[in-house]
Image: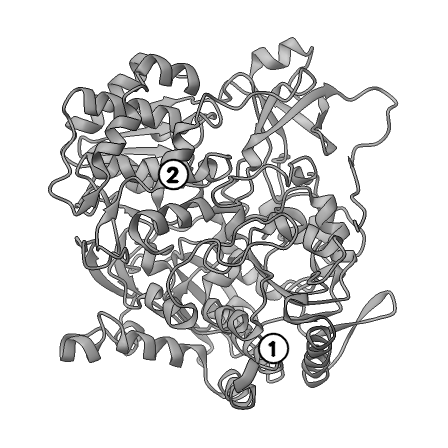
Amino acid sequence: MPASRVVNRQCQLCEAHCGVRVHVERDVVTRIEGDPDDVMSKGYICPKGTTLWDLHRDPERLRRPLVRVGDGLEETSWDHALSLAGERMRAVQREHGRDALGLYAGNPTAHSSSALAVEVLARVMRSRNRYSASSVDQFPQYVAAHEMFGDTTLMPVADVDRTDLLVVIGANPAVSNGSITTMPDARGRLKAIRARGGRVVVVDPRRTETARLADQHVAVRPGGDPALLLGILHVLFRDGAVDTRDLPITGMADIAQLADPWTPDRAGEAAGVDAAVIADLARAIGRAERACVYGRIGVCHQPTGTVTHWLINVLNVVTGNLDRPGGAMFASPPVDLAAVLRLLWGRSSLGTNPSRVRGLRDVHGELPVVAMPEEVLTEGPGRLRGLITVAGNPALSSPESARVDEALRHLDLMISVDMYVTETTRHADIILPPVSHLERDDLDIVFPYFSVRNNLRWSPKVFEPPADSRTDWSIILRLAAELPGGAVGGAVRPLLRTIGGAVPDTLVTSALIATGPRGPLRRGRAGVTAAAARRARGGLDLGALEPRLPGILRTRDRRVHLAPPSLLEAARALEGGDVAPNDDYDLQLIGRRHLRSNNSWLHNIESMVKGRDRCTVLLHPDDAAARGLCDGDRVTVSSRVGTIEVPLEVSEDMRPGVASIPHGWGHDVKDVGWSTAAATSGVNVNLVTEAGLVDSLSGNAALNATWVRIDPVQQGAGTAGTTSTTVPATT
């Protein structure tokens, strides 16, 4: 390689995948900047993108496999680590059955081709105990998509670049840069809506960074979103402002009947919003030439998450804004992920294999992660005894973290594919670290499925990986090759071993593109190829989103089902917002995130954690005054399951009666290999969130439904830190 060079690729630390230019002098990265040629981000970059070099050279990033010896972890060879992993995985399944070995996949798996490898591993494992971070942040959208469109992957994307009115509910794209609506430089895109004469409205209990860019902020009560949406639907039907543009639908009369009793007065009382605001918002949506309602994680974290996302889809349908430019649309990606998943798993499904202990239903073969601890701690046939984790950090990201930690300690076997010793992987018997982001080629086929503009981008490696190293693709497929593989195991195991060892993931994704809906095998010489993406600086712009209904629908009648019975029943049972369990807990806790943080990632990078303490509890001035609290005070935040201590930040941005703490913090535990992270302030908010609080239709963790109380730290009461109940193994 030349001594001085610039590599154009993407930052893969979050869903936005912004284009970056990596400047290299010999073997040192001297600068990382936004790539103005990137077809999606056009030069935008957030602070996270500048850390790729810091992550690559972090001395605490693992380079060699670790195996547990006594109470510690020691380096070993790849051959020994992988052989040992295979031997122990087979032993668990042989002695206790296939469900005794489970799988957990964290969010980063979707940011590379390891997503495909994880699906193959899960298919070969054939275990009921399959989990991921999806049941913390997006299961409600899966279920709504399955019930309405016939497939969990058919989640509409907000066409923000052409809309005249964008209503954002429980999302903060100014910080996230979009999620299940991938929109790099979301701030610029939101400003562009207003610059062309459109409007942006944000519905959220907190005046978020996105709300500060908007024309209007509606401070809804946590959990009040479905009532607000029903109130909007009531006004639209009452005023005759419904127009579906002859979309192929069923159930319109049922929706009209459902919305009929939800007058703005009733809806406003339940949502904590003035009736006039609901009526005005309904009229604005009904009159807009092109409008889109977009919801995300904030409403997923409620017991009404699935109902809310369903009603968001319904609202886009009845105003004629589904599958319409400027509305909620479906991307036309180079690879049809839904078809790939159907090839592996069959038709999209719900509730075919519920959890053993609580009977929580699965979503397309995956169980809610809130069930994972009890599946470990509850004795009996089918108990989860071994776990493979791929990225992610459920010891911080899952509710009732003390119970998750207890469960991880009770496993007979834990194997982790991870770059660090984290709060989760510190419990592992074997840790298998992949190469860094800068040491691998990639061809993103996941996020084009949810992008605001059709695209295909190649991401080349910056450095050649060390000779004795492995990508996450090869590690995961080798683990799959070590499993029996069922009746055809004799053929599957050597094939997977060969693919994982000799076939790069980019060759597989290139083949999927060639055979995909835009590939040359479908479109001849005009087809899109991976080679073309590799040659194109900044990637291929494949155009704006296009109408795709009814062709992509997977319902049996090829129609959009507006009124699935289970969702109608849940909506009819709605009353109002959540009610505090008792007088001791009078504040509802919601989460938040920061532009410099991505879950627990990047907390070991000094530039991302320096400065003021960002792990604070936000509280409205009236709530602080009622408790005799001042900005900067240290307070305890207590729920029914635990207590944490954090500094208080008094803020007019909060709705009264609501508190907010960010997630992903709390690294001050023994044996974690993140010295910078461990030295930062911050506590784990999931020590106070409750695993028993879920969206009943999807099993998604209802983190924003936690009720807490906030008290001043008593002088002499002890040092800052955390306490929480510990849940023992049950019988």
- Across and down, in percent, residue 668 comes to 76, 46
Q: Are marks 2 and 1 in contact (CB under 8 Å)?
A: no
* Above or below, 109 relative to 225: below
Q: Please give the residue where the numbered disc 2 appears in the rendered image.
A: 567
Element on which disc 2 rests = helix
Going by the numbered disc 2, the residue's amino acid type is: Leu
Q: Residue furthest left?
A: 246
What residue appears at the point 36 percent right and 24 percent down from the top-left corner? 228
Q: Please give the residue where the numbered disc 1 appears in the rendered image.
A: 479
* Above or below, 78 relative to 143: below
* For residue 211, side relative to residue 129 (left or right): left
* Above or below, 354 relative to 162: below
Q: Give the label on residue 609, or none.
A: none
* For residue 540, side relative to residue 67 (left or right): left
Quadrant hosting residue 414 = bottom right
Counting other residues with Cα less than 10 Å from the Cα at mark 1, is it few (<14), some (14-19), or many (20 or more)? Answer: many
Task: Calculate the distance from the C-alpha at mark 2 to the C-alpha at mark 1.
Answer: 39 Å
Is residue 179 visible to the viewer in this orientation of the structure?
Answer: no
